[in-house]
Image: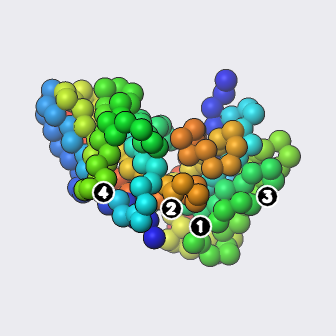
Amino acid sequence: KAGVTQTPRYLIKTRGQQVTLSCSPISGHRSVSWYQQTPGQGLQFLFEYFSETQRNKGNFPGRFSGRQFSNSRSEMNVSTLELGDSALYLCASSLVQGMNEKLFFGSGTQLSVL
Amino acid sequence: AQSVTQLGSHVSVSEGALVLLRCNYSSSVPPYLFWYVQYPNQGLQLLLKYTTGATLVKGINGFEAEFKKSETSFHLTKPSAHMSDAAEYFCAVSGHSNYQLIWGAGTKLIIKP
């Protein structure tokens, strides 16, 4: 069974640009969560999608948005990039919403904003 | 509001020595508690979890953690460190009704030969 797949693995953008990250969950998983990981900050929860609907949202500005498709694949978009958006963005999937003990993480997308 | 504190951003132990990674949480009610491990260039993997029942929880790779309500702690231990244990370890908590995970800042475990 394939794991959680995140693409691309690395991204370099400049300030003001926008970026779209993709996450394909494990087959059969319907919940996808997104996290931002920065050194010394740990993981910050961005949002969770289940059945194409955003179910939970963290404390991030509106420049961060996401969506989920009918096949459970999810995309995250960041507009008007800032230097502080440089981070590892992790996606996690689970069978249903809120199954924290059954979260499976992808390897992440490393975003560098110059 | 819940919060998680991991003492020490870096912990260094010799191979074969005891590993102790500290995690304290603040919560008005006993939460669900988790330890995750992140190896270089990889995502996070669940090591162990506490939800209810026995307070001493055993996980993968020989790790275990004990939930101590009176100390609001969930420290991670392993009797004998192995070189392959070098990684970053994250403690996380969630509520019973609010499933959002709250994460500690992480502790990098360094194993000296």
Q: Which residue is label 1 attached to? A: A58
| Viewer-proximal residue among A24 and B74 | B74
Q: Amino acid at mark 1?
A: Gly
| Viewer-proximal residue among A110 and A39 | A39
Q: Earlier in the sequence, mark 2 or mark 3?
A: 2
Q: Secondary structure at mark 1?
A: loop
**Callouts 2 and 1 close, C-beta under 8 Å:** yes
Q: Which residue is label 3 attached to? A: A53
Q: CA distance from mark 3 to mark 4?
A: 35 Å
Q: Is residue B1 above or below residue A38?
A: below
Q: Chain of mark 2?
A: A
Q: CA distance from mark 4 to mark 2?
A: 22 Å
Q: Chain of mark 3?
A: A
Q: Which residue is label 2 attached to? A: A44
| A83 relative position to B58: left or right | right
Q: CA distance from mark 2 to mark 1?
A: 8 Å
x, y percent for residue A76:
69, 58
Same chain, labels 3 and 1: yes
Q: Earlier in the sequence, mark 2 or mark 1?
A: 2
Q: CA distance from mark 4 to mark 1?
A: 25 Å
Q: Which residue is label 4 attached to? A: B72
Q: Secondary structure at mark 4?
A: loop
